[in-house]
Amino acid sequence: MRPARLGDAAWILELRNDRESRRWSRDPTVIALEPYAAWFAEHVDEYHVQRPTGYVRIEPDGRVSLIVGPQWRGRGRGLALLTSALGTERYQAEIHRQHTASLVTFLRAGFVPVRLKGDWLDVERAPK
């Protein structure tokens, strides 16, 4: 796991635009590279990558998102990515209630459910 670099933008966007990734995203639209690259340049420090496996994004407020590449899904790689990116701070995530693989990964990483809002389950991990 390493911090993302600007050169990772296209690869991260490819994983984010993957059909299965979009299925479980709050925003399922396909994003074009040109506007994304400019946005990514402002947020690159929020990303931790392990190519070709996937990436973790940790926003300044502690909100976490995780995407595992299609060829690595179902192999336990998400848990390894997630735990290697997290520090000792408080973290939270939103998980679609039907996305069992993601929910299990976050629970195994020490997150606990805190509230259900429609189809989305908020989970949190207390500081360690």
Image (spheres, rainbow, N blue to C red):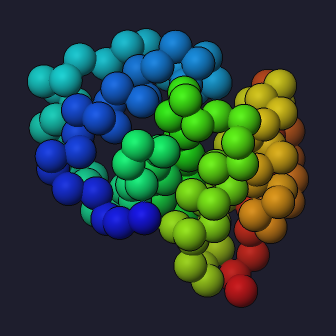
Relative placement, left or right, of 59 versus 2 is right
Could you say which quadrant of the image residue 59 lies in? bottom left
Residue visible at 31% across and 65% down?
3
How many marks the image carries: the answer is 0
Residue visible at 56% across and 79% down?
87
Residue 75 appears in view: yes
Query: Looking at the picture, how far across and down is residue 31, in whole percent?
Result: 31, 19
Residue 26 appears in view: no
Q: Quadrant of the N terminus?
A: bottom left
Give the camera-side residue of 55 and 39: 55
Relative placement, left or right, of 66 versus 8 is right
Residue visible at 83% across and 25% down?
98
Query: Looking at the picture, how far across and down is residue 10, in whole percent?
Result: 23, 32
Could you say which quadrant of the image residue 50 lies in? bottom left
Q: Is residue 123 above or below residue 19?
A: below
Q: Is residue 18 above or below residue 93?
A: above
Query: Looking at the picture, how far across and down is residue 68, in whole percent?
Result: 55, 39
Give the camera-side residue of 88 and 19: 19
Give the camera-side residue of 14 and 37: 14
Residue visible at 43% across and 29% down?
16
Q: Quadrant of the C terminus?
A: bottom right
Query: Looking at the picture, how far across and down is residue 66, in whole percent?
Result: 56, 46
Give the camera-side residue of 124 and 103: 103
